[in-house]
Image (tube, grey):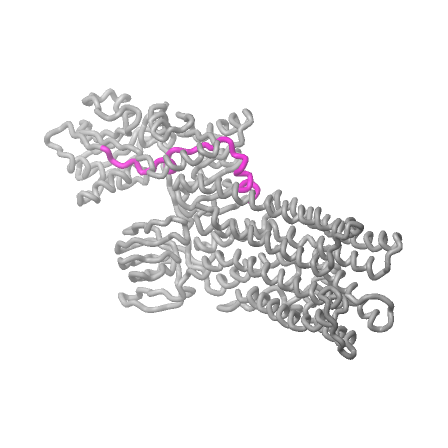
Amino acid sequence: MNLDPHSNQNNRQRHHHHSHHGTPQRQEAMQQKDQITERLEEKTLHGHEHAMHEDTTGHPPHGEHGHDHHRMMIADFRKRFWISLVLSIPVILLSHMVQNILGYSLQVPYSLHISFILSSIIYFYGGWPFLTGLAEEVKKSSPGMMTLIGVAITVAYLYSTAIVFGLEGMDFFWELATLIVIMLLGHWIEMRSVLGASKALELLVSMMPADAMLIRDGETVQVRIEELQKGDLILVKPGEKVPADGVVEDGESYLNESMLTGESKPVKKNNNAKVIGGSINGNGALRVRVEYTGKESYLNKVIKLVQDAQKTKSETQRLADRAAKWLTYIALFAGFGTLAVWLLLGQEFAFALERMVTVMVISCPHALGLAVPLVVAISTAVSANNGLLIRNRTAFENSRLITTIIFDKTGTLTQGSHEIASVVTFDKAVDKQEMLRLAAGVEQNSEHFISQSILRRVKEEGIAVPPSQSFNYLPGKGLEGMVEGKDVKVVGPNYIKEFNIQVPSSEAEEGVETVVYTLVDGQPVGYITMRDQIREESAEAIRVLKENGIKNLLLTGDNERVAKSVSDKLQMDGYLANVLPHQKQEKVKELQDKGEFVAMTGDGVNDAPALAQADVGIAVGSGTDVAAETADIILVNSNPQDIASLILFGKATYRKMIQNLIWATGYNVIALPLAAGVLYQQGIMVSPAVGAALMSLSTVIVAINAQLLRRQIR
């Protein structure tokens, strides 16, 4: 077993290179905002945009107001609804059937012709979205809800028109008018719900400020953010939004990154700290060096991930699509079948036609078409706002099946930074500060977490780091170099044992603390101990998972004592110690072979095989490395509570989908036979207008239920 503290196998160094995020170009950002909205429209409105904007190319003008395309459609539906409603009132009042039901008489000359004229306006103006939707679906050979609505209102209108011009029977003008009005109302409310689902992403896009303060030749110049380039130095004043992603070169402040990462606490930023465009600066001024621009920006990467997640269909979505398609065919068959059956039973054509229209209207799979896509849109956008980036929707929904979750220790349950616990010297001629100074001279050449811990302590104590020469890495042992003419080595126990160097016994807690020795000109002068601190949030995360019946295991390359120490403190269900990186995949497979549904948490890079093997791979502690290709879900923060939140939110999302599917299909199972008239002999009948009201009500209920998902995330 390799005990050297600098070994990659013994200690998992986390290089959390944030997926370096530049500033999104203004036009590009607006274009993405349009695409977000249009994707939601396409997935949930099934042709409405064609109805409202027959000449649209699908790409509204870019710029500040491009994202108003969806709002324009909502406004158009609202306008059509109110105009149709006003015109429907006299049609309803003039209807002989309504007069008989309400017990009043209204004698108006040419009342039937007046109803015909008003109904014609309602049919062509109010019904236009459904008629164009029907045409689009027929054109694509994909009949759906627009086909059902279009056929229903067209049959009702043509039959009623024939009555006006001499055919014997009862007109359907009042049913036609109320049907279109209720349909418009339902679609208007539904589209407002869809808009709510896209607002979260629009907010992300709009977070970038328009301008930046560029430092040029010692002077500050205000420029548009699209003019910024990699390497530019910018000034971020107190209270301002950070205009670009980059690295702090000077200054200290606390930044609010909650809208980007879900982290509620302001994050301290000083020299060499990375900042994300769109975060809000606190009370300090920062000078930031721009690192990345355009498509490499964090916001652009997040938006693309969310778009891809919304575009990629999960198994649940595919089930809903198949159900909606079959329900459309069933409804068309049932509608014409109802007409034929009632005619064969000797009923009047008007009665049989009314039953057919009612069946077609009431069985529209509109609620089914909205049931899952709206939940997808909301859950994906809300997740992104809380630092949970979903790449694989099926895996996200499958979080309800997780029986065991494997936690990688370093950087997830623990801080991963290994802070210095003690500094001990053997030689009275070399005090603690001098030993740290000499050690830092060598360690400044390394990115290892031990090196970074020593350098942090040196900086805190205000010790100047001396220059070094002849730096050399001792594989599996440590580092060495020449500092001020002295041969300085910072090594682990392996080196001490190999060369049989005599050192006083260490008081470090064996196996739990990391020990590095400092040698000057071959003589040991002291040692430094480090301990990886357990995160405050870890215990709560483990408790929540246990409450939900999910077993949790610790997986680490560290020795048994370290693993047991962390596992016991957090009251975990067990641990797997001394596991090398290439063995992690095997451990996951072993659990799966025992019938466990396994979630694996890792950094998305070193744990790639295990993340790919797991049923649900969760990349954590990768900062903003949104390019982690092997993970199903990426958590922006390393907070273990986010893992618990993710699993519970995945369960809640799936629950909402199933609730909506049950409502949308169950409603049809009950309503369709009633609409066909199976209880006609018992005096139970559903009119086309009532059918339209029930259909719209089911759609609205599904939309509201999906919106309630926002409350589910912690």
| Residue 216 location, quadrant | bottom left
Quarter the N terminus occupies: top left
Percent position of residue 296, x then y? 45, 54
Percent position of residue 431, x then y? 13, 34
Nearer to the camera, 500 or 182: 182
Left or right of residue 672: residue 48:
left
User: How many numbered tags mark residues here?
Assistant: 0
Left or right of residue 683: residue 201:
left
Quarter the C terminus occupies: top left
Which residue is pictured at 15% across the width and 35% down the height?
432
In the image, residue 409 lies in the stretch drawn in magenta: yes
- In this view, 398 is above or below 321: above
Nearer to the camera, 288 or 90: 90
Nearer to the camera, 576 or 442: 576
In the image, residue 659 lies in the stretch drawn in magenta: no
Percent position of residue 148, x then y? 73, 57
Range of residues picked out in magenta: 393-421
Residue with the most extreme left position: 429
Percent position of residue 69, x then y? 56, 66
Which residue is pictured at 41% across the width and 52% down the height?
260
Left or right of residue 9: residue 452:
left
| Residue 528 location, quadrant | top left
Left or right of residue 230: residue 320:
right
Which residue is pictured at 37% across the width and 39% down the height?
14
Residue with the most extreme front position: 103
Which residue is pictured at 63% across the width and 66% down the height?
57
Residue with the most extreme bottom position: 109
